[in-house]
Each structure stands twice: as structure tokens, then as C-alpha cells.
Amino acid sequence: MTGRQRLPGQRPLLRTLLVAAGWTVVALAGTFALDPFRNYQLALVAAYLCATAGLTVLVGATGQLSLGHAALMAVGGYGFALTTNALPFGGIPAFVLALLAGVLASAVVGLLLGLAAARLSGPYLAGLTLAVVVALPAVASTWSTVLHGDQGVQIPFEGVPDGLRRVVALEQWQAMVAVLVTAAVVTSLTVLRGGRFGLRMLAVRDDEVAARLSGIPAGRVKVLAFTASSAAAGVGGAVLCFVAQAVSPGAYTVGFSLLLVVAVVIGGLGSILGAALGSVVIVLLPWLIGRLTSNLPADAAQRLDGNLAVLVFGLLLITVMAVAPHGLHGALVARRRRTTPDVPRPTAEPAPRKVLVPTEEQR
Amino acid sequence: MDRLVFLLGTGLARGAVLALFALALVLIWRGARVVNFAQGAMAVVSTYVAFEVTSLTGSYWLGLLAALLAGGLLGFAVERGVMRFASPVSPLSGVILAIGLVMVLQSALGIVFGPDYRPMRVPFDDTAIVVGGVPLLSPYDLFVLVVAVVVMAALAVLFRWTSLGLQMRAAAFAPEVSRLLGVRVSRTVTVGWVLSSVVGSLAALLLVPTSLGLNPHATDSLFVLGFTVAVVGGLDSPVGALVGGVVVGVAMSLVTGYLGAGLVPIAVLVLLVLVLLLRPAGLFAAAEARRA
């Protein structure tokens, strides 16, 4: 990069860190204002955000879609749970080690899948990752001596550390841990995207041939982007395992994987803020719908349970894609721009604007 | 030995179904450059139509006919109602629209019919035909094979020797030039979706009776298998889908027979990874065609 000139999507490091610290403090302070159930939901949002932020960076920066981020979360969760159970000690050191193991596991799996499919353009990555989620229950029951089949792996209960027990409840503690871990993940992804590597991802996305001619190893960039995205999803799975004290294949279905895609699309492809908004929506909307249908007769409630939320999400996905392809974040940006029409925005254009690359034939 | 022959026979019949399903994917890929991730969900809707009509009238054949009609209508509705919104410059928007469709169709089926598995019956004997003392195929497997071969032959005739088929091939190959030459490209794309949806529905109809039963998610694994077949054969190649279907069908039948049915999804995954690593262009497509 030359001099002080900034290119689209580039952000100064200090500003990124300050913004991240600000959001983290707000979220941590927020945990004191929430009741235990809300704190549990906040922890879920944080865990989902790890995965959706990884997914949105993948889609926005490389134009590739993964339908299997739930499986990568599961890999992170299993890595976390198995390491926790193998360690002779507990507490925060064990948590950190287990988290690292979970991230490592999901990054390795992501690297393998990425080597197979991420270098290709087209629907290959989406199809392969879908096959991974579909195979997850079979994997868990084939290696059931380690992974314990459909039941999954439980980890021992770990309460609030002694010093804090007076001040915070269990749910709040879990939410705080989830927020801190997620903050680290999201900040790393933002820094990654704002730096040299992010520029390479954009170059490859916008014109792979031109990128290659400029000496960018396009295949390697795509594979690494998918690996980073997988690692982020793995952290999400580890956090979810920490909150639920268990990991099982039943929690990481195709449906959940598609829900992550919904979050990313309705938030706005490529936008991390959008991923955060989307994660809130996919946690709150099913809960709200569940509240609404709980008064119905048992048979109807059973049929609507889960299905109604998926129906709404499906319609939402189609509508957003047809009417507002840039999602919530795009709507916010457009609105802000409309209210301040005289400010030109030459290079400050956010990265997600043009997500999709025309293929060779369509040009 | 007997077991091997039987597994090969069953694998052939399964492979024919997979080939049909993959062929439906290839049809749309060639015509619209979209992998229709909703094809499984669309096919399961048609299968529910067949199930309902069969239980109302008592006739398997009326159910089959109704399902094919429903499949055609659904293909038309999906192309005109949903896929038209896909951005022409974005390979992703088609995939995302299809995923939205999967969620809508499967959850609507779940709301209307509930999550139970409903066994589907077919008017065929399920004991294997014995040839020279070796059990070979069940009559139903034979029926599946015959149907698959007839449908593929019909498609081949359509594309090879009819004006519509020629127009469809031209529109898929060079839409702009075809339009200039008077081909109504948007209509041929619609016809492609209708055809593909009918063929995909037929594949699901043939497969579901041999599986656990009918459920809104009954075709999830069929979709993954069909996608694998299409990739093995090369997404652009109908002949590839045919050969890929037989290869994958027989391989999965052998895995089921010798290692257990539980391993099939893992075997599919391994196969898909290997093909993508070693020969991403597929076994039957021209390598240059895949750069897009």
C-alpha cells in the first residue's frame, strides 16, 4: 500500500480498535441491565455473531457462500468440549486452551474443505459445505466412542469464578465471556479485512484474472479467507458449548446453517454490523413467534413450532434478495446518504456494495 | 457373490434415480447458470401431491400423473415468481433465493402435514427377481430403471432432434446471439425450469418409496447425492450426470451393503472432496467450460 491513501474498505487500525472497545464496553455494561434470560439470549447472539461475521466476510470479500457454517461451529464445539474433558484442571486457563483447540480444529477442517472447493468459483463451495452439514450426524454416530453419537459430548459445570460470584449471576457471567470472545473475533476479522489481505480478497473478488496478473495468488487468498471464516465459526461453536455445557449434532442442523445465511443476508451481505443485526433477528424472532403460538391448541402449536419461524425467515430471505439486496445495513446507509446529499463519498464506499462478480459468459 | 450381484443391481436402480435428479440440476445449470438448491424441496412438494392423490383415489398411477403436473406447475411458478428476481450478474443471488424457497416450502409442508414419516406404497412386489439362482432386482427396481431410461431417451430426442431442443441449447450456449436470431430466450429458460422440475419430481417419487418414508426433509440427502453426481459428471454434461449417477449409485449401494447405511453421507462427502480436489472439472466436461 502506498502512503496514506486509503482504498475502499480500508480502515485505520486505531479507529477499528477504538470502535471495537466502545461496542464491547457497551455490551458488557448492558449485561448488568438484563435479566438472566435476556443475558442468555445475549450470549446466543454473541455466539451466532462469531459465525455470521465470519460468513459475511467470506461472502462480502470473496463472493463465495458457505451453507455449512453450522457444521464448522459444531467442529469448534466438539474441539472445545473434548479438550475441556481431557484437561486435568479447570477455570480460565482450561477455557482458553479449550477455546484455542476448538478454533484450531475448525480452522483445519475449514482449510481442508477450502482446498477442495474454495479455489473454484461457482456453486461448489456451497454444495460441499451443505454435504458437510448433512453428514454431521453420521460423523457423530460413526465415531461414537469419541463423539457419543446423537447425545453429543457434555462438559462439567463451571460456575462463576469465586471473586465475581457475589456480583454477577451465572447467565450474566456467560454473556460477558461470550461478548469478550466475540469482540476478539469480530475485531480480528475487521482488522483482517481492513488490511493488506482484505485488499487482496477484494481484488480477487472483483476480477480474478486481473488479480492474478498483479501477482496475487488468487486460489490461496480464497482458501485462506474460507479458513479464517471457519475459524470464526469454530469460536462461535465453542462459545455455544460453553453456554450450553454440551455439544450435539442435533443443534447443528441444515436448518440452523441456513438460518446463519438468513442472518447474513437480511443484515446485508459483507457488513459486520449487518451480521450483528441479523444475529439479533435470528435469536429474537423465533422466540417471539414461539410466544405468540404458545396459546394455540397443542396440535396446532406443535405443527407451527419451529416451522412458522422458518417460513417467515424464508419469505424474508426471498423478499430481501428481490427488493433490497443490500439488507438492513444497505437500507441504513442509503437513508443516511439521503439525509446528507451534499457529502460526496468517493473512496469511503463500504466494501459490501458490490458483492457479486459477473461470470465469464455473462460479461 | 450373490450379495455383490444383488448390491450391484440395486445400485444400478438407485443410480438411475440419482442420474435423473442430477440431470434436472444440469438442465437448469446449463440454461440459467444457477444450481437449483431448491430442487429437493420442490420435488418433495410434488411427492406430497402424489401421496394425497393416491390416498384419495387409491390409484398409484393417478398420483404419479398428478405429481408430474404439480412438478411442472411448480417449476413454472418458481421461475416466474422467484428466480426472475435473481440478479443476472450474481451467481450468489440465485443460490440465496433458492435457499429461501427451501425454507418456505419445507416449513409450509411441516405446518400442513406435520413432521411424521408417511410410508409410501407402490403397486409392485418387493421380492427380488431370481435369475439363475441369483437374486438380482426387485420388480420395482426394474420399473425405476425402465422409467429412467425412457425419460433420458425422451430428453435426448428433445434436445437432439426437435426445434425446441435446439433453441434451448442455443439459448443456454449464447443467449445474446440466440435472441438476435429470434429465439425467445426467456421462454426457453422457463421451459427448462418446467422440464427440470418435472424430472426432479419424478426422481423423488421413484426414490421415496424405497426410503424411510415421506417427510418434509425426505429429499435433503437426495439433493446432496444428486449434487455430487452432477459434480462428478461435470455440471455442464448430461451424459456426465448419467454415468455419474450409475457410478455414485453403485458405490453407495456397496457402501450400504458392506459398511452400513450410516456411512453413506460420509462416503458422499469423501467422494465429493476427492473429485473437487483431483478433477474439479468433473469427469466429462471440457475443462475450459468450468472457469466461469
Image (cartoon, coloured by chain):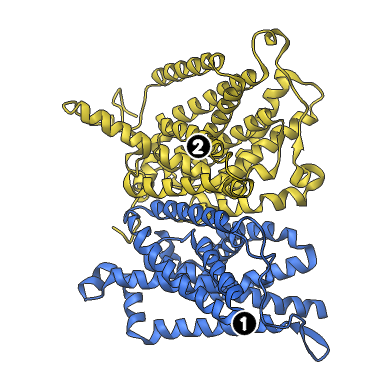
Compared to residue A72, the image places residue B63 above or below, namely: below
Quarter of the figure that contains the N terminus of chain A: top left
Instruction: Describe residue A185's horizontal placement relative to residue A142 as left or right.
Output: left
Asked if badges 1 and 2 are on one and the same chain, I answer no
Compared to residue B118, the image places residue A116 above or below, namely: above
The residue type indicated by label 2 comes to Leu
Location of mark 1 (residue): B145
Compared to residue B257, the image places residue A3 above or below, namely: above
Compared to residue A282, the image places residue A84 above or below, namely: above
Residue A41 x %, y %: 57, 28
Q: Which mark is residue A285?
A: 2
Residue at image position (71%, 19%) is A93
Residue at image position (71%, 76%) is B10
Instruction: Describe residue A337's horizontal placement relative to residue B50 as left or right.
Output: left
Residue at image position (54%, 24%) is A184
Q: Secondary structure at mark 2?
A: helix
Residue B136 x %, y %: 75, 83
Relative depth, front residue between B28 and B270: B28
Residue B253 x %, y %: 71, 70
The residue type indicated by label 1 comes to Leu
Chain identifier of the blue chain: B
Instruction: Describe residue A2's horizontal placement relative to residue B135 as left or right.
Output: left
> In the rendered structure, the residue with mark 1 lies on which chain?
B
Q: Colour of chain A?
A: yellow
Mark 2 Cα-neighbour bin, 10 Å: few <14, some 14–19, many ≥20? some
Residue A353 x %, y %: 32, 39
Q: Is residue B1 visible?
A: no
Residue at image position (59%, 59%) is B113
Quarter of the figure that contains the C terminus of chain A: bottom left
Q: Secondary structure at mark 1?
A: helix
**Within the image, what quadrant is residue A151 found in?**
top right
